Amino acid sequence: MHLKNSVKKQCHILQMLKAHARKKHLSFHTPGHKNGKWDITELSYSDNLVSPNGCIARAERDIAQILGSENSFIITDGSTLGVHAMLYTAKRLGVKTLALSPLSHQSVFSGLAMFNLQAVTFVSLSVEHIAPALEHADALLITSPDYYGNIPDLSAISTLCKAQNKLLVIDGAHGGHLHFDNNLYAGTYADLWVDGVHKSLPALTQGAVVSAKTEKLAKALQESVLALRTSSPSYPIMASVEYAVKYPENKRLEQAVRAFANKHPLRVRVNQDWTKLCAYFGKHAFKVQKELEKRGIYPEFCDGEEIVFYLSPATKYAHFIKLTRVLSSLFQRYYANKEERTQRIPAPLVSPKNMPMEWVEMQTAVNRICAVNFGLFPPCTPLVLAGEKITQEKIELMQNAVNIFGVKDGKIAVYKEKE
């Protein structure tokens, strides 16, 4: 607790809120709940995220120094706005086409559509697959870490982009905690990057930071953020973002996570990012997920084979130990071998031009061509892309999943078949 209090004392926005929460405050301003203490609007003492010159400005300067950026901008609209701001910045800097993975977050695809940007896809985040795609693009956008904690060879990818004089944009939404390790952190290599601070650090939901490496990029990014962000940012979220970025690492928990994975090599994988613990249950995965929830244990997501648990430096050690005991018991009851893990390999895309689409029942969509991206939510990466052939396996996965996206009234959009 002492450590957390010491962090709080370094947080400019939080200290401003605490100081004024103790004073008499009759609220005749927004928001409408009229509490007038923590959740406030832009007042004479609270600074202004649109044009900060007080506690928010000091917070953003501290964040930029910690993250190694020229400028970092607090976001209260989630990583999605950060992704869109980066794409809009790239567009305004002359980028027309981006090389990217088809396993990118759905916000990437919505951003491409919003800003009329084209995509050239590659099948993996290896330099060998990225390089040919990048030759036909003006910039590269990658996700690091991904939703399973995988981190590509960022140094080699950065070198490739510099050699081709191409912008490197990184969706680091799930890696805000990695700024402790320069070798793994997106901001060490990217020109533009977003940290979804709330995903892996103790910030309120929708708390994020988007950053730029150089003065030129920072100016362009600031203009993009101003154009897209809300004009009514949440002060509690802003305060939590600053607190989260300044929160210390948790080596003890990281070592315990890796030790548990080493103890169960056939059932658990922890990749470069230790906060994503992937437990393999194969065909039993959805059943095990339900059993876990009955015990009050809620993982981040289940992909039909693996159940993925998201930890953070703020995860209580005792809670993690409880999780390991439950998983160890479940491993004995439900046999599976993670070597059997199905690899998601995107299928070749078809590009129907001017073809009408229709919404059909899931089962009748099998072997049809997808017209609107759909998938599991989370992680909100397309299971099937528009232009991809829909398989029986993917439909069964959608039918078994708890939360999905790209579906309307239980139906999937497909291109109409020729008469």
Image: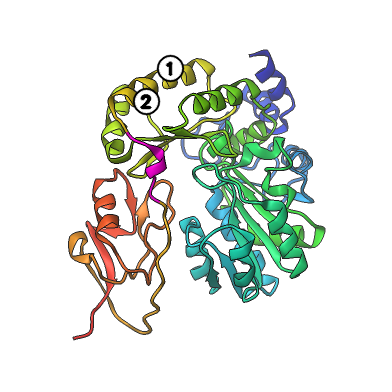
Q: Position of residue 306 (x, y in %)?
A: 38, 39
Residue beneath disc 2: 297
Magenta-highlighted residues: 336-342
Q: Amino acid at mark 2?
A: Ile
Residue 138 in view in this figure: yes
Which of the two discs, 2 and 1, labels the residue nearer the N terminus?
2
Q: Nearer the viewer, residue 257 or 206?
A: 257
* Depicted 215 relative to depicted 114: above or below: above
Residue neighbourhood size for the residue with mark 1, other residues' Cα within 10 Å, grouped as few (<14), some (14–19), many (≥20) = few
Task: For marks 2 and 1, give the CA distance.
Answer: 10 Å
Q: x and y percent of residue 326 in the render? A: 37, 20
- The residue lying furthest to the right in this view is 215
At horizontal 62% and vertical 24% (from top left) the residue drawn is 21
Taking the spot 64% from the left edge, 61% from the top edge, the residue there is 127
What residue sits 70% from the left and 31% below the top? 246
For the C terminus, which image quadrant?
bottom left
Nearer the viewer's eye, disc 2 or disc 1?
Answer: 1
Q: Kindly indicate the quadrant of the structure image that contains residue 65.
A: top right
Q: Residue at x 37, y 61 (%)?
A: 384
Q: Is residue 242 left or right of residue 401?
A: right
Residue 66 appears left or right of 91? right
Assess whether residue 338 is covered by the magenta stretch. yes
- From the viewer's side, name the closer residue of 189 and 200: 189
Location of residue 197 in the rendering, given as x and y in whole percent from the top left corner: 59, 40
Q: Quadrant of the N terminus?
A: top right
Bin the neighbour count of mark 2 within 10 Å (Cα to Cα): few under 14, some 14-19, many 20 and up.
some
User: Label 1 belongs to which residue?
Assistant: 322
Answer above or below: position of 133 versus 410: below
